[in-house]
Image (tube, helix red, strand yellow):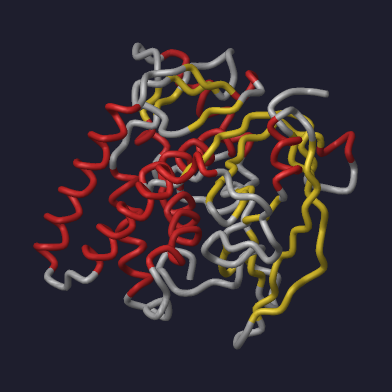
Amino acid sequence: MMSNGEEPGPSQADINFQRTDSPGEVNTSKVESESKRDEVLGKINNLLKEHDEESWQRGKAELISERLNELLEESQPARISLMDKAVHQGFIHPDSNVYRSLMVDPFRVDDPEIYSQLLDNMRKMQHSSWKERSTRELVPTAVELTVGGYFGNYVGGVEQRNRQFYTNKLDDEVDYISLSEFKGQRIGVCVEKATVTQNLLSFLGYQSELVASTGNQFGETPQVNQDAHMYNVVSSERGHFIFDSTNPVEVINQDNKLVNVSPATYPISEQEYSDLMRGGKVEVTHTNLHWNGTETAPLESSTRVYAGPKDI
């Protein structure tokens, strides 16, 4: 179910980054970004109407080339590290070095295949039970499916193999790792997944921030689960949302097996967003889902704590 574009269970917020409460005063500086988002989604919507396979592939390649050229002109190579405890805004240039640790080689988000897979997933969704949904409504789930599908793992539990992968690369002559070397290896963790998410959202025209921080908590025992983590914050006229593609909503069947994932998106208030960007913490409620073969139902909720870009 996770790779075929079928409809998963509902996300923590409405599927198109729609708040369930009032976002408060809208920041008018976002207007230009939202105009670009609407323009890009409009082009994608038109492309999704194409049924001829050859025309689809040609149109997809042209759209990706045009959009990436725009993003390359707007961005510059940067250094991004999980250890920096900082925020990166916008598109990550393909020549940027992204560090999991300063003890190993960086990787680069340099594989345009991620954008092709994103559009393919949106197309599959529109030809399934999602066909009545708007293009904007497809975005969170399409991004989640693309990230998990590209790396080959939709959930965690691969930390040790990820570390070993980087260690094995230390003897390579090239001083950086291309993103394509992670493809299908089932070793993607937050550093790789959040940076790819950042570029997918930026490609679609969304205003997104990549947050690297320590002090995040994903369990009941802080001394064990105080984690360094990378995640994304999406902002629009509908408010601010934490988007954690590394730790999605898990859909579990009666045999306690993972059968699907849904995007973990959490609406936060303007004050919570402001506090987060200053290094504060935001507490959210996370709920996985149970699939009984016919429908989903919520499992017991848990608390997650997302920390801002510096220790306080």
Quadrant (top left, top right, bottom left, bottom right) of the C terminus:
top right
- Number of numbered discs visible in the structure rendering: 0
Name the residue: 63% across, 29% down. 212
Quarter of image, res 101:
top right
Name the residue: 58% across, 14% down. 102
Q: Where's residue 91, x and y in %?
A: 41, 33
Q: Where's residue 261, x and y in %?
A: 57, 63
Q: Is residue 209 left or right of residue 266?
A: left
Name the residue: 31% across, 36% down. 111
- Which of the pair 155/277 is nearer the observer? 277
Q: Where's residue 42, x and y in %?
A: 29, 60
Judged from this view, the residue extending furthest toward the bottom is 294
Classify 208 as above or below 51: above
Quarter of image, res 131:
bottom left
Name the residue: 50% across, 39% down. 29
- Which of the pair 254/294 is nearer the observer? 294
Q: Is residue 105 left or right of residue 233?
A: left
Classify 182 as above or below 166: below
